[in-house]
Amino acid sequence: MQEERKTLVSVLMPVYNGFPGIKLSLNSLLLQTYTDWECIIVNDGSTDRTKSFLEDLKDTRFKVVHLNENKGRGYARQVALEHVSGEYIAYLDADDWYDPNKLAIQVTYLNEHSDIDLIATGIFSYGTKTSLQRVREQKNNRVLIYALGNVVPFSCATAMIRSRTAVGISYNLNINYGEDVDFFARYLDRKKYSILSNVLYYYSEFDSMSIEKMRKAYFEIFTRDRRISSFLKYMYYLLLAPMLGLEFTIKRRGRKAVNEEKKRFQELYSRLFKSKMI
């Protein structure tokens, strides 16, 4: 019988003052049904317990790089990218987590579709200080071709790409907001991609989200790309969002999670929270 093909996945994780939330993130990797992965964690000059926590990790699949000072997300992502040894690259932020089947589903898809260079998934957004739960980027698995200059139509954190087609593409170290969008726009130019309908990424978004943060982000994005869509989003967060409130703004992001998705979230979150793996 022919031996099953093994494909190493490099999961990139920048972190700055991510303790204790990073424990959930790493546990979600340890609970993956697909086990051929490495996680390249770049500690971006953290001043909390993050560094000592990372130094105590026993699983050799975690590859830790410490930066002496905080350099920013673009810099940290680039350092992680330079340490990749896997055939595929995935992404996991230090306060988010995966469905246990995420890597398995995406690896299978890329293995079976050699002409596709990026596969993304649906994303579930939540917060511990709000009961609002939203789902975004849940598409119908169509294969599309991206053209540089268009809006990146998926949540970057959910993506898995081929490392061979990322050669020569770097993160812009001068970008504070949207560095991942900028990277993927250049990576995907004239390449094929697809977005799975599966919700496989859980985004701890709403606790850290603020109108001021979004306003700063879209101002920087607009000054960089000069797109009318970016300008309109900046104006929304400048003029309307302060009057309408954060909850109204959150409700505009994606759709309301249905009961089955909420139940899945609660089951997985409870499993991760109780896990003693790390």
Image (cartoon, rainbow, N blue to C red):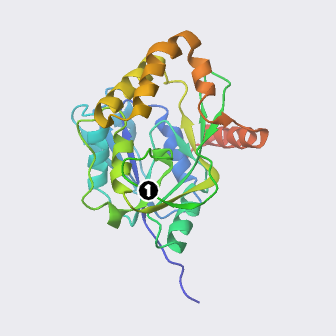
Circle 1: residue type: Tyr
Q: Nearer the viewer, residue 170 or 255?
A: 255
As drawn, the residue found furthest toward the right would be: 259
Please indicate whether residue 50 sits to the left or right of residue 121 in the image.
left
Q: Nearer the viewer, residue 162 or 186?
A: 186
Please indicate whether residue 232 sits to the left or right of residue 75 in the image.
right
Q: Which residue is mark 1?
A: 146
As drawn, the residue found furthest toward the bottom would be: 1
Evaluate whether residue 85 shows in this view.
Answer: no
From the top left corner, tell me how far across and down residue 124 is, in percent.
61, 40
Instruction: Give the residue drawn at x 58%, y 13%.
Output: 244
Q: Nearer the viewer, residue 260 or 145?
A: 145
Mark 1 Cα-neighbour bin, 10 Å: few <14, some 14–19, many ≥20: many
Q: Nearer the viewer, residue 157 or 275?
A: 157
Above or below: residue 132 compared with residue 154? above
Instruction: Give the residue drawn at x 54%, y 73%.
Output: 112
Above or below: residue 253 compared with residue 153? above
Q: Which element type, helix, strand or loop, lies under badge 1?
A: loop
Instruction: Give the residue drawn at x 72%, y 42%.
Output: 261
From the top left corner, tell me how far across and down residue 21 is, in percent.
49, 33
Please indicate whether residue 4 sits to the left or right of residue 259 in the image.
left
Please indicate whether residue 88 sits to the left or right of residue 246 in the image.
left
Q: Quadrant of the N terminus?
A: bottom right
* The quarter of the displayed image where residue 271 is located: top right
Above or below: residue 82 compared with residue 5? above
Instruction: Give the residue drawn at x 42%, y 59%.
Output: 161
* The quarter of the displayed image where residue 17 is located: top left
